[in-house]
Image (tube, rainbow, N blue to C red):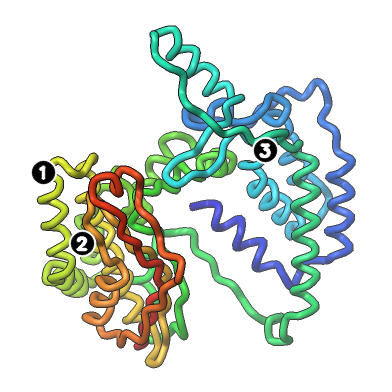
């Protein structure tokens, strides 16, 4: 998602920031006042409509313009935009909550929804969220930038000498289509945390940020399908992956990966169990079945390519959570490790947090409580 490029640009400039310039930049921000005649308003889509108080909705584009046209360095401007992106949620009547955005009871969206419900004889929504006094754009920008400057100052004082020459290469693309293009035996190690198989739709959770960065409804829907399959709306990528691998002369590799997925007994058992539970009416959305299948299919492509591009002795660490649907526990860490082992990795360890993940109230009411592992799987080539 485009948020990543904003964050990575800011991080890549750690050694290049001029602290005195950044402090002057904060003073510049603190003196800004939006003119009364300024009438531009931040963009919105259906699910973000009326997300901000009226003044904030006008302040966001104004401060954005002032940052981008200011006389400061590109590094300072990039940090300012990142801080503004980070501030969108606390500036709004929304809060990230699992699979969706929760809405403050004072938001126009909730007020209108409740009025419509009452007019039709229904009870109003039981909304409990009240975020209290929301900050102004100026206040939170100054606060975020001040915190960032403290972090940058600390890092610049404590970074080892070799870090001055470190280069970050960032590609805003899907690992499914970028990893196959990398050369074999070139990577020293991998630390990553993919989306979990938990139905969380990151394009909805980060809708405020995506819209701010210029995405409309169509672009967000397209991005939703491009992400790793982890929502019930995800469509299979197998055909597009097969076509892609054929186009780059790697169809044999594609066949190996699909064969490994098909022959994985644990995954097959999970998929059969989920189908049975769906047939029994225990799963409230049949999209869960194709989501789970697509999730492991796509990760298998990632595991295969990581083994190919890693150097001998390289370690790969994946952070992930196990999940449960209709009482069926899906051991994501075990299945992933077995797929990685099949491709050549040696499993070293599966670390688990003491604090295990709970279940939804709906599942516990029918199937009881089963704590789920939060794991870090560690493999070596």
Of circles 2 and 1, the one toward us is 1
Q: Which mark is residue 296?
A: none
Q: Which residue is mark 3?
A: 91
**Camera-side residue: 313 or 111?**
111
x and y percentages locating residue 303 in the rendered image:
31, 73
- Eyeballing the image, is 77 above or below 104? below
Q: CA distance from mark 2 to mark 1?
A: 33 Å
Q: Which mark is residue 242?
A: 2
272 relative to 149 in the view: left or right: left
x and y percentages locating residue 158 in the rendered image:
76, 80
Q: CA distance from mark 3 to mark 2?
A: 44 Å
Q: Which residue is mark 1?
A: 280
Residue at 31 percent across and 54 percent down: it is 229
- Eyeballing the image, is 375 above or below 290? below
Circle nearer the N terminus (1, 3): 3
- Eyeballing the image, is 186 above or below 323? below
Other-residue count near label 1 (Cα within 10 Å), few / some / many at <14 / 14–19 / ≥20: few
x and y percentages locating residue 49 in the rendered image:
54, 27
Other-residue count near label 3 (Cα within 10 Å), few / some / many at <14 / 14–19 / ≥20: many
Toward which corner of the image does residue 381 lie, by quadrant?
bottom left
Toward which corner of the image does residue 7 lie, by quadrant?
bottom right
Q: CA distance from mark 1 to mark 3?
A: 45 Å
Give the secondary structure at mark 2. Answer: helix
């Amino acid at each position: 998602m485009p948020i990543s490029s904003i964050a990575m640009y800011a991080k890549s400039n750690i050694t290049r920031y001029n602290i005195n310039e950044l402090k002057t930049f904060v003073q510049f921000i603190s003196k800004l006042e939006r003119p009364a005649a300024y009438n531009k308003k931040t963009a919105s889509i259906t699910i973000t409509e009326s997300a901000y108080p009226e003044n904030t909705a006008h302040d966001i584009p104004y401060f954005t313009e002032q940052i981008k046209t200011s006389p400061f360095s590109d590094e300072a401007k990039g940090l300012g935009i990142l801080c503004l992106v980070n501030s969108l949620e606390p500036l709004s009547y929304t809060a990230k909550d699992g699979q969706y955005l929760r809405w403050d009871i004072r938001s126009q969206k909730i007020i209108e929804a409740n009025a419509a419900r009452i007019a039709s004889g229904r009870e109003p929504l039981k909304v409990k969220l009240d975020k209290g006094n929301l900050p102004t754009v100026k206040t939170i920008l100054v606060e975020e930038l001040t915190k960032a400057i403290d972090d940058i100052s600390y890092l610049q004082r404590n970074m080892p000498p070799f870090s001055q020459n470190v280069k970050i290469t960032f590609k805003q693309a899907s690992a499914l289509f970028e990893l196959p293009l990398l050369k074999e035996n070139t990577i020293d190690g991998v630390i990553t945390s993919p989306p979990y198989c938990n139905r969380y739709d990151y394009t909805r959770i980060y809708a405020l940020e995506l819209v701010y960065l210029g995405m409309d409804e169509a672009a967000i829907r397209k991005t939703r399908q491009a992400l790793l399959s982890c929502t019930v709306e995800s469509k299979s990528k197998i055909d597009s992956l097969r076509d892609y691998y054929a186009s780059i002369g790697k169809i044999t590799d594609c066949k190996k990966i699909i064969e490994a997925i098909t022959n994985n007994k644990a995954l097959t058992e999970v998929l059969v169990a989920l189908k049975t539970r769906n047939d029994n009416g225990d799963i409230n959305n049949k999209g869960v079945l194709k989501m789970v299948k697509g999730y492991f299919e796509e990760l298998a492509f990632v595991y295969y390519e990581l083994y190919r591009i890693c150097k001998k002795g390289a370690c790969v660490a994946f952070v992930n959570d196990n999940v449960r649907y209709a009482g069926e526990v899906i051991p994501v860490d075990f299945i992933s490790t077995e797929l990685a082992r099949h491709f050549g990795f040696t499993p070293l360890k599966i670390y688990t947090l003491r604090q295990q993940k709970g279940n939804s109230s709906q599942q516990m009411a029918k199937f009881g409580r089963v704590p789920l592992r939060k794991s870090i799987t560690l493999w070596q080539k």
